[in-house]
Image: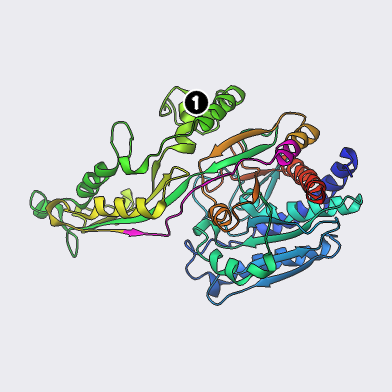
């Protein structure tokens, strides 16, 4: 049974306007930062408040047969587990995934905008977490409700919303084990936590980079000393830090240690030729560049490959130094830098972590005290070859609800659960998509959810669920 475009769109648009957006506003107000950024999350109670808000909204989801539970393992961020029985004549299961934990505030929000106070402006919902990834539960259940409202069959659906994704999902394996029997054997995974190259069509993520986070600590003294008295005798901890950086990153070209590279598949290179034609200068112009600042390269295809299939390094935090206005003439005893390496999708993150740790710590300059403290390395993910029905369904959905063809590309970010699922269920198919388009700025200031895109993606998910039921019943 095919879905009716106008009826499905009307149902989903009304649900977004009347229920989802107001609830997302309440959700934005909750500062439920991921446990890596709020070690006291359990005592502070924000995470519990957020998951209870999502759980309470399920009462109004109008999904027939919906059962749900906030599952809490000791010391682990809770997950919301939902189950909806099949209305189609099939035994297949669809797993729909998202997360509700958030990145920290960050600085630089425009006047009138802030991380914890929602603002609706020009069709966008500003605030932390709406696009990354608070909308996932609402979109998933609303897609199912839309099908049921039209009498369109769907398979059994499981919705799993976790609270640790922004910290590397280190809590999630415990829940996957605990809920394994209740999850069952999904043959389709729908993930709504990815990027979109523009807001004009459905974007499907074909690969995700891995991640190697850690803190590099350099100590030269047990306490700070007058820079005049110590300068020239005591080596600077910052200079030693710079020397260690040069071991893993060429300061001129940005090229990283050779252990972090893989051969790029020809299919990915061909894919990005098409993406470059569609996006053009948007690949560069989407970022808020400083005056006269230039990108790494002028070649759009190479920039896209850099972002999806080559490693990169970001220094996301520094410790051990006062603010410039508070700085005295003191030679500091230590400097620490939080590093995040993004790894090619097929690179083993644990092996890379072992190599980088050894390179940074061995034979330190002046025998300084050096430690690279690792934080949950994550191997990336590559989508399996698309089943013919799913490829056709996503193509039809994009034309039906966006009016333009679907697009495919690798993504520079990391979603640990995709690798976990791919390993656990080798035959599973993936629909990985999202609302994180140009300027949406997840993790940074002025994060927003483009509401119209959220509606259209919800419609596309409904179409794919309907087509999945038809395919599964054959």
| Magenta stretch holds residue 209 | no
In the rendered image, residue 443, in percent from the top left (x then y), is placed at 53, 48
Image colouring: rainbow
**Which one is in front, 413 or 285?**
413
Q: Which residues are magenta?
A: 373-394
Count of numbered marks: 1
Image quadrant assignment for residue 148: bottom right
Picture quarter with the N terminus: top right
Q: Nearer the viewer, residue 172 or 133?
A: 172
Mark 1 lies on residue: 301
* Vertical side of 219 occupied by 324: above or below: above
Q: Residue at x 15, y 51 (%)?
A: 365
Q: Residue at x 69, y 53 (%)?
A: 187
Furthest-front residue in view? 474
* Horizontal side of residue 82 vs 274, given as left or right: right
Instruction: Please name whichever residue, 299 or 259, is drawn nearer the observer in this view of the structure.
Output: 259
């Amino acid at each position: 049974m095919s879905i009716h475009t106008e009826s499905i769109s009307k149902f989903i648009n009304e649900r977004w306007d009347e229920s989802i957006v107001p609830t997302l506003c309440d959700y934005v107000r909750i500062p439920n930062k991921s446990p890596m950024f709020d070690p006291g999350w359990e005592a502070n109670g924000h995470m519990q408040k957020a998951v209870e808000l999502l759980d309470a909204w399920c009462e109004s989801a109008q999904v027939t047969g919906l059962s749900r539970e906030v599952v809490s393992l000791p010391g682990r961020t809770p997950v919301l587990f939902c189950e909806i029985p099949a209305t189609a004549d099939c035994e297949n299961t669809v797993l729909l995934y998202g997360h509700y934990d958030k990145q920290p505030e960050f600085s630089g929000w425009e006047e009138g905008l802030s991380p914890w106070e929602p603002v609706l402006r020009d069709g966008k919902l500003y605030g932390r977490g709406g696009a990354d990834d608070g909308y996932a539960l609402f979109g998933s259940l609303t897609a199912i409700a839309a099908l049921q409202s039209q009498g369109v069959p769907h398979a059994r659906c499981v919705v799993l919303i976790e609270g640790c994704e922004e910290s590397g999902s280190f809590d999630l394996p415990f829940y996957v084990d605990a809920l394994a029997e209740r999850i069952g054997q999904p043959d389709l995974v729908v993930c709504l936590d990815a990027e979109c190259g523009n807001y004009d069509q459905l974007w499907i993520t074909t690969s995700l980079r891995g991640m190697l986070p850690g803190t590099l600590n350099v100590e030269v003294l047990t306490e700070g000393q007058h820079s005049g008295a110590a300068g020239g005798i005591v080596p600077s901890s910052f200079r030693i830090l710079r020397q260690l950086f040069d071991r893993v990153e060429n300061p001129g070209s940005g090229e990283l240690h050779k252990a972090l590279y893989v051969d790029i598949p020809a299919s990915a290179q061909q894919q990005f030729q098409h993406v470059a034609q569609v996006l053009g200068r948007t690949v560069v112009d989407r970022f808020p560049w400083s005056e006269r600042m230039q990108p790494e390269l002028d070649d759009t295809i190479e920039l896209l490959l850099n972002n999806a299939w080559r490693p990169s390094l970001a220094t996301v935090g520094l410790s051990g130094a006062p603010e410039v206005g508070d700085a005295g003439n003191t030679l500091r005893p230590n400097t620490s830098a939080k590093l995040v390496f993004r790894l090619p999708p097929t690179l083993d993150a644990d092996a890379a972590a072992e190599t980088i740790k050894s390179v940074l710590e061995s034979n330190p300059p002046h025998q300084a005290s050096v430690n690279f403290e690792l934080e949950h390395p994550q191997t990336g993910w590559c989508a399996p070859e698309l089943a013919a029905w799913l490829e056709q369904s996503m193509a039809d959905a994009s034309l039906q609800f966006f009016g333009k063809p679907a697009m495919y590309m690798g993504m520079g970010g990391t979603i640990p659960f995709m690798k976990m699922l791919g390993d656990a269920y080798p035959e599973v198919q993936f629909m990985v998509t999202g609302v994180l388009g140009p300027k949406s700025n997840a993790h940074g200031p002025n994060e927003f959810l483009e509401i119209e895109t959220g509606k259209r993606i919800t419609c596309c998910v409904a179409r794919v669920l309907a087509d999945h039921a038809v395919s599964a019943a054959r």
